[in-house]
Image (cartoon, rainbow, N blue to C red):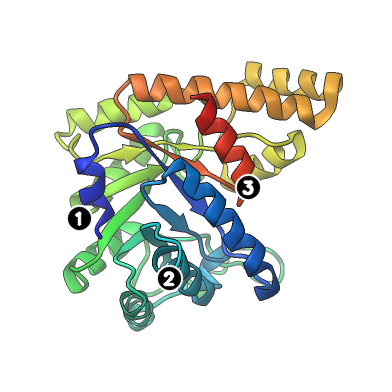
Amino acid sequence: MHIGELIKKQEKPFFSVEFFPPKEKEKWNDFFQVVEKIKAINPLFASVTCGAGGSGQDNTVEIASAIKNNHGIECMAHCTCVRSDKAKIDEYLSELRHANIENILALRGDKPKNAEGLVDESLMSHDFKFASDLVGYVRERHKDFDVAVAAYPAPHPESKTFSEDRKFLIEKIRKGANFGITQLFFDSREYLDLQERLKKEGIADCPIIPGILPIQSLASIKHTLSLCGANIPGKFFLALEKAYDEGGNEKVKELGLKYAVDQIRILLDSGAKGIHLYSLNKAELCLQLVDMI
């Protein structure tokens, strides 16, 4: 079933979740136990990531298929194009179609790097320079898929300004995106500003689902921020450091959960149709968070 249609039909706020496939198959049994536990929050859908740079998409297909067909959660597979040509995208979407997956999150993906750790433009796709190129191609050649896109409340690290980043999102929507999911963020004002910009452009009918990450530890949030380029309000970060000094990561987790609950309430009160949880494959954290709303 197309997730865009499911979102439009929702009269009450919903939750959705993101999973990342374990690389080692011996860990899959534990992973699917997490999936089964998370069903308690009745997620509208689940998204399944692929490896950095688009690697590991074989696991994405198998995991997404199992989540939908064995565990009964509608599923969306990440689809990156940074290293792919049109033939590879066609093949990947064919595999998803065969697995009964009808939804993708269209992403460019991280730029490939050489042995020295520098971006190697020669490894980039010649068919797809931006995620918007992938959106347009899928909408033209694979119309049976729903296409979601990434949205950035704060600018993507490669965008120079808020305005430039908003233009990229608007282009993806106008090329045929059915809905968007945001990168994790901690300042709700950025999401509200994003929504206002879309309204001014006359495309506010494309749902943008805010993505929320419940903080588990001080080290984990530092690592996550370094990877994705998101930012965190200075006052909140100082509070996390103080909590760590006073009670370690248990205090950090407690403060992080309270902050996430307050943030979700603000977002839902401001008109967000639902909340996408970056689960980190942790069922208990998601269950606790939803129970606190």
Do tag 2 and tag 3 residues touch (Cβ < 8 Å)? no
Mark 1 or mark 3, which is nearer the start of the sequence? Answer: 1
**Kind of residue indicated by mark 2:** Ser
Residue 86 relative to residue 202: left or right: right
For disc 1, the marked residue is: 176
For disc 3, the marked residue is: 282
Helix, strand, or loop for circle 2?
helix
Q: Give the Cα separation between the discs numbered 2 and 1.
A: 24 Å
**Numbered disc in front, either 3 or 1:** 3
What is the x, y in percent for residue 66? 46, 69
- As drawn, 235 above or below 31: above
Could you tell me if residue 83 is visible in this image? yes
Helix, strand, or loop for circle 3?
loop
Residue in the picture at 26% in, 25% down: 196
Helix, strand, or loop for circle 1?
loop
**Residue count near mark 2 (Cα–Cα under 10 Å), binned few <14, some 14–19, many ≥20:** many
For disc 2, the marked residue is: 65
What is the x, y in percent for residue 171? 25, 49
Residue in the picture at 56% in, 66% down: 51
